[in-house]
Image (tube, helix red, strand yellow):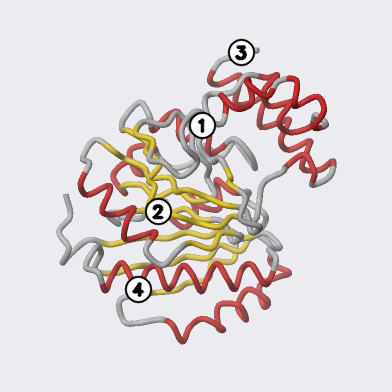
Amino acid sequence: MPTIMSARLHVCIVLYRPDANWLRRSLHATLNACARAISDGDVASAAIDVVNNDLSAASAVTAALDEVRHQLTPAIALRQIDAPQNLGFGAGNNLALRDSSSDYVLVINPDVEMQPDALSNGIRHLAAAPDCGMVSPVAMFPDGQPQYLVKRHPGLLTLALRGFAPRVIQALFAERLARYERREVGFDQTILGCEIVSGCWMLMRGSLWRQLGGFDERFFLYFEDFDLCLRASRLARLDRVSDCRIVHAGGHAGRKGWAHIMLFSRSALMYFNKHGWRW
């Protein structure tokens, strides 16, 4: 286990035409959380890689990073990586993290704003629980409504209902959907031993990341996080930690248009083919 004097954190944020306001908020909060983890003695240094999957937006991403560079300290590095093409979410993270030797790895979306102590509390949880390999946070939507990032291994009907069914139909399957989202546990309570957590914010041991080989790049978008979690859960425990908190503005693939629906469906097919079909 790393000591406080030597522990290193590697953060990766993958972008594809992000909302400029949320990107600035996410970068600002991420730098604050890294600084807090360093000042609290949980890590000695942090490297933040921002992977831009859209070359046409390179200058805009550079401008956003320049706005927060005043927050950098000698212990925090911030780097922009412009991918030659849109690699997708998993491959974008792998590009930055493939050769990482850090003790902790954080994968975070550009529409996530974490609390200043989220990283410190997550790292402390990992340090105190040797059998835990990954931490997921308690999350809320920007309007303060709870967001359920912890899931059970889904069935086909569950995904169809949750992603595309009108609310009147969803209401008929409320118990099934609640079970899928682990709603039997209090929204903001710690869960020790999760099957699946969201890829919008994943804090894990660097050794686990390397053992897994990163994301399966066959998933261009959607379900790469589900796949990673199922593989990770065979090696270590995945926990949701109550004092690790974020605001997440994303989700709702079914409301993003036909292109996202097609990507979602393709990745779902790949996921079930890999991990087994269930109704």
Q: Amino acid at mark 4?
A: Ala
Reading the image, the residue beneath label 1 is 227
Q: Position of residue 5 (x, y in %)?
A: 15, 67
Foreground mark, 2 or 1? 2
Marks 4 and 1 in Cβ contact (< 8 Å): no
Disc 1 secondary structure class = helix
Mark with earlier residue (4, 1): 4
Reading the image, the residue beneath label 4 is 35
Q: Position of residue 4 (x, y in %)?
A: 17, 63
Reading the image, the residue beneath label 3 is 278
CA–CA distance in space, label 2 to label 1: 23 Å
Residue closer to the observer: 99 or 104: 104
Q: Amino acid at mark 1?
A: Asp
Foreground mark, 4 or 1? 4
- The residue at the point 73 percent across, 30 percent down is 265
CA–CA distance in space, label 4 to label 2: 16 Å
Reading the image, the residue beneath label 2 is 244
CA–CA distance in space, label 3 to label 2: 32 Å
Disc 3 secondary structure class = loop
Marks 4 and 2 in Cβ contact (< 8 Å): no
